[in-house]
Structures are given as C-alpha cells and as structure tokens.
Image (cartoon, rainbow, N blue to C red):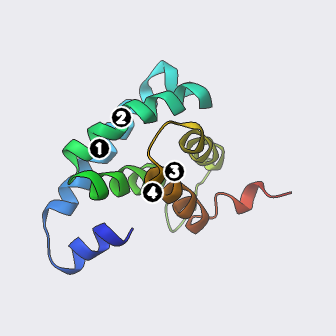
Amino acid sequence: MHHTVELLVHGDQKVNEYYRAAVEHWKEIWARAESKDVYGLAEVLYDEQSWFEQHCGGSRVGQEVMVVSGFAMLYTTQAGFNGKATLAKKLYDAFQMSGCSVEVTFLAREVAKSYGVLEEWVA
C-alpha cells in the first residue's frame, strides 16, 4: 500500500482515477461465470494482472491497486465485510493459487491480514 499512499501524500490526482477504474473492472471480474469458484477466479486474476498494470499506474502501482481495491470494495469501516467475508477469503485464496507475480501474492497476504480476512478463518 506504500506506493499509492505515497502518491496520495504527494497530491497525485491520478491515484483516485486508478482506484475508480479498478473497482469498475473488479465488478466486471466478479460478474464472470469463471469467477464463481476459487480456481476459476485464480485463473482470471492471473489473466487480469496486466490489465491493472496497464490501466492503473504501471507495474508496482497497478499491482497494489489491483489487490487493495479488490479487498477494499468488499469492506466498509462501519460494517466490516457485512456478509462478504467468505468472498474476501475466496479472493485471498485465489490470489495465492493464481500465477500472479510474487509481489501480488505477497501483497494480497498483507492486505488480507490488515482487513482481518485470515483471522476469521483461524480455528
């Protein structure tokens, strides 16, 4: 999350556009039939990493926007995941199973931890 926070702190107006574009793209991803199960979603994530990099600020920024927006759009500070915790866990699992870059899978773990996704599934 450091790349996009740095952009925000330095007043880069494009970072807002990156996140808005990412959320709209995530809506399309979630609507796909292959995104209904974790294995299909993992394949979709692998295929879509380059879209985020191309449309959301380049390699590092695009990877960060991909991961953060994916989790953040499922969560609110007032209600948490509000019935979407299973979806958030599926997203985490799909990132880990995908062929996405090491940077993306590592960031997905860190973001999932920050949102408490992994805590909810610990026995």
Q: Give the structural element (helix, strand or loop) at label 2.
A: helix
CA–CA distance between discs 4 and 3?
16 Å
Between the C-alphas of marks 4 and 1, the distance is: 15 Å
Point out the tag, 4 or 2, that comes first from the N-terminus: 2
Q: CA distance from mark 2 to mark 3?
A: 14 Å
Task: Residue at 43% x, 34% y: name it.
Answer: 46
Query: Looking at the image, do the residues carrying marks 2 and 1 touch, with CB atoms under 8 Å apart?
Result: yes
Where does label 3 land, which residue? 105
Q: Which residue in the protein does label 4 denote?
A: 72
Disc 1 designates what residue?
A: 52
Q: Single out the mark in the foreground, 4 or 1.
A: 1
Amino acid type at image mark 3 = Thr
Q: Position of residue 96 (x, y in %)?
A: 59, 44
Instruction: Count residues near mark 3 (Cα–Cα under 10 Å), then give few for <14, some for 14-19, many for 20+.
Output: many
**Relative height, residue 2 to residue 119 (above, below):** below
Residue beneath disc 2: 48
Kind of residue indicated by mark 2: Glu
The residue nearer to you, when weighing 92 against 31, is: 92
Work out how far the residue at label 4 is from the one at label 2, CA to CA, in angstroms. 18 Å
Mark in front: 4 vs 3: 3
Residue at the outermost top position: 33
